[in-house]
Image (cartoon, rainbow, N blue to C red):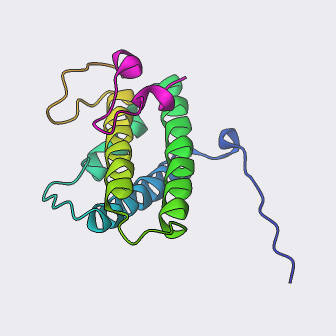
Amino acid sequence: MNIEHQVVPAIALDTPQRAKCVSDQITQLCAVLRLVERIAAIKSNRPPVDQAALVHEYCHACGIAQRRARTLIEQATAVAVAGVTALLNRDDRSPSIAAACLATELRSVLRILAATVGRQSAGSAEPGYGLALGASRSASGLPSGQFLM
């Protein structure tokens, strides 16, 4: 059985389809974050973002912010896939440090995503589109600006 992956250009999707796609991707990223936090033994009682509010803000953001948000989501998804794959392929039996770094990066990109569509994330002093976050570093020491163009 040959299954082909067909990429649908974002421009061809209407707003409800785009919002559903973005909503599903944010839900998946949050689920991966929760899984990685469990591997890292991080107890987090608060969600990284309010998913419903983030999707609402996305739907009401200007076109350029929506395109930037979709790019961030694509990049975050690639990082999540690579990070989880690396965790699964590790030879050592203690993946908690690597998982904690990945969790920090995922939580960071979700905050940047919230700032990109105009929401201020809890505890963030960065207004607007997250441009000031480009030079910052996450707790893992890795540049969080890798998600910004």
Residue range in magenta is 131-149
Residue 129 visible in the displayed image:
no
Residue 79 visible in the displayed image:
yes
Q: Residue at x 52, y 51 (%)?
A: 77
Outermost residue on the front side: it is: 92
Please check the rendered image and state whether residue 141 is part of the magenta-colored stretch, yes or no.
Answer: yes
Outermost residue on the right side: it is: 2
- Please state which of residues 49 and 84 is positioned toward the viewer in this rendering: 84
- Please state which of residues 109 and 143 is positioned toward the viewer in this rendering: 143
Image coordinates of residue 50 in percent, x first then y, are: 24, 49
Image coordinates of residue 3 in percent, x first then y, are: 81, 74
Name the quarter where the C terminus is drawn: top right
| Picture layout, residue 28 above or below residue 53 | below
Outermost residue on the bottom side: it is: 1
Please check the rendered image and state whether residue 102 is part of the magenta-colored stretch, yes or no.
Answer: no
Image coordinates of residue 56 in percent, x first then y, are: 33, 43
Q: Residue at x 50, y 37 (%)?
A: 72
Image coordinates of residue 1 in percent, x first then y, are: 86, 84
| Picture layout, residue 95 above or below residue 10 | below
Q: In which image quadrant can residue 117 be found?
A: top left
Q: Residue at x 38, y 47 (%)?
A: 106
